[in-house]
Image (cartoon, helix red, strand yellow):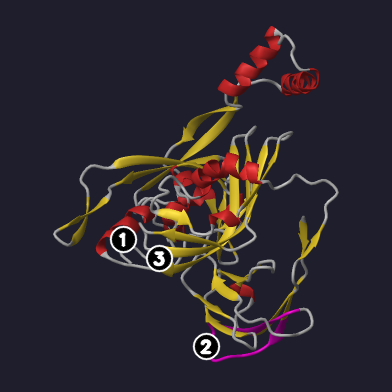
């Protein structure tokens, strides 16, 4: 089933004394107010809900995404820089389900086969302390031809993180895993509610933040990358001559289709060789070609906005001294652990915000330590060290 949704945002001039306040109403397609719409700054603890008459008021700053979310309506997101000093009328039209011509079904069997993979990829590995309370609402489909797993969440996911002391209302917009390319991607919006804040929880938060991708981008924005302990190197990709060529990959694909249709067949040696090289060899090899590159090499400023803008892969090294709690004080350990992450700007530009977020974060490919920062280590964007 496919959802078709019409979303309208009408902005009327409205001047208020507080420049950081956003006011408005949420209504349906015939102008009736919609109550209990979750309205929040994405990735933060700042939010509200619409009143019985659809009205809302929220304090905000520039460069936050404002999310309007209610089950059975498509989530609507808009940047607050477009909204300050304006009164909003947000019109949400309820989703209608339309039958698709070709359907890859979401089945119970697929759920059972891939639920653990999804939880590892999305939540992380601490399933005892971090869990989705309404996990059974998830729907799974698997495209056998293209080896692509997709997961959708008809309801807002309620995620309890005991380690960090938050409950997260997560609206999963997209989750897909391509097993041929060995890539996983998920995009969503999140609203945090603090559930506890003792010393142990604060310690866990400090260690989750230190060296994270958010920490790195806050350092870039403040021009304090080296001061914060990050070292950025340039990585260049070189084609791997041992990886199969496009022609060889096509031969492998054609043989797989023939094998599927005919059943038992002898596999030629050259096909076995192509398959082995595809499994065991990376398409590219990488090498460090510049070390300790300054912020000016991979950022640019335009119209007082800061952008990540780089043609190469970036290696980010960080010496992490884990925080410890000793005699009621938070102190750093004396022996560090070196953590390595990779960012792939892919010749695109991403605006960097003061809170450590970027524009289009779902499109920025990362690997290494940054890729391990799944929901189990996710902190609000308004988190400050020591909170």
The mark closer to the camera, 3 or 1, is 1
The mark closer to the camera, 1 or 2, is 1
Q: Give the CA separation, mark 3 to mark 1.
A: 13 Å
Q: Which residues are magenta?
A: 11-28
Query: Tag 1: Cα neighbours inside 10 Å, few (<14), some, or many (≥20)?
Result: some
Q: Position of residue 118 (x, y in %)?
A: 55, 45
Q: Is residue 170 magenta?
A: no
355 sits to left or right of 14: left
Query: Going from the N terminus, do you reach mark 3 or mark 2 first?
Result: 2
Q: Position of residue 19 (x, y in %)?
A: 54, 85
- Is 244 or 52 nearer to us in this picture? 52
Question: Please, what secondary structure does the residue beneath circle 2 have?
Answer: loop
Residue denoted by label 1: 201
Q: Position of residue 73 (x, y in %)?
A: 69, 69
Q: Position of residue 62 (x, y in %)?
A: 55, 73
Q: Give the CA separation, mark 3 to mark 2.
A: 23 Å
Residue denoted by label 2: 18
Query: Going from the N terminus, do you reach mark 1 or mark 2 first?
Result: 2
Residue drawn at (52%, 42%), measured in percent from left and top?
Answer: 116
């Amino acid at each position: 089933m496919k959802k078709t949704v019409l979303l309208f945002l009408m902005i009327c001039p409205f001047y208020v004394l507080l420049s950081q306040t956003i006011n408005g109403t949420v209504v349906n397609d015939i102008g009736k107010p919609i109550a209990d719409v979750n309205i929040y700054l994405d990735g933060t603890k700042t939010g509200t809900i619409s009143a019985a008459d659809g009205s809302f008021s929220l304090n905000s700053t520039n460069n936050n995404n404002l999310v309007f979310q209610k089950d059975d309506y498509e989530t609507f997101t808009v940047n607050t820089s477009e909204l300050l000093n304006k009164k909003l009328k947000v019109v949400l039209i309820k989703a209608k389900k339309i039958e698709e011509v070709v359907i890859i079904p979401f089945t119970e069997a697929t759920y059972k086969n891939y639920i653990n993979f999804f939880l590892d990829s999305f939540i992380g590995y601490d399933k005892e302390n971090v869990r989705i309370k309404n996990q059974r609402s998830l729907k799974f489909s698997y495209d056998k031809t293209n080896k692509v797993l997709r997961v959708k969440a008809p309801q807002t996911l309620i995620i309890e993180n005991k380690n960090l002391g938050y409950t997260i209302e997560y609206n999963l917009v997209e989750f897909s895993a391509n097993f041929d390319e060995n890539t996983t991607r998920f995009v969503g919006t999140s609203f945090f509610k603090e559930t506890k804040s003792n010393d142990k929880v604060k310690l866990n938060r400090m260690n989750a933040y230190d060296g994270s991708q958010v920490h790195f981008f806050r350092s870039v924005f403040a021009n304090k990358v080296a001061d914060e302990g990050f070292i950025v190197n340039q990585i260049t990709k070189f084609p791997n001559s041992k990886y199969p060529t496009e022609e060889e990959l096509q031969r492998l694909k054609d043989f797989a289709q023939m094998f599927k249709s005919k059943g038992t067949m002898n596999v030629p040696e050259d096909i076995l060789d192509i398959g082995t090289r595809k499994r065991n060899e990376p398409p590219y090899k990488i090498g460090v070609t510049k070390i300790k590159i300054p912020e000016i090499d991979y950022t640019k400023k335009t119209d007082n906005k800061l952008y990540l803008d780089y043609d190469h892969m970036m290696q980010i090294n960080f010496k992490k001294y884990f925080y410890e709690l000793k005699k009621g004080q938070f102190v750093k350990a004396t022996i560090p652990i070196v953590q390595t992450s990779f960012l792939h700007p892919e010749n695109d530009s991403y605006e960097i915000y003061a809170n450590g977020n970027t524009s289009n974060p779902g499109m920025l490919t990362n690997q290494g330590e940054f890729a391990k920062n799944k929901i189990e280590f996710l902190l609000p964007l308004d988190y400050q060290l020591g909170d």
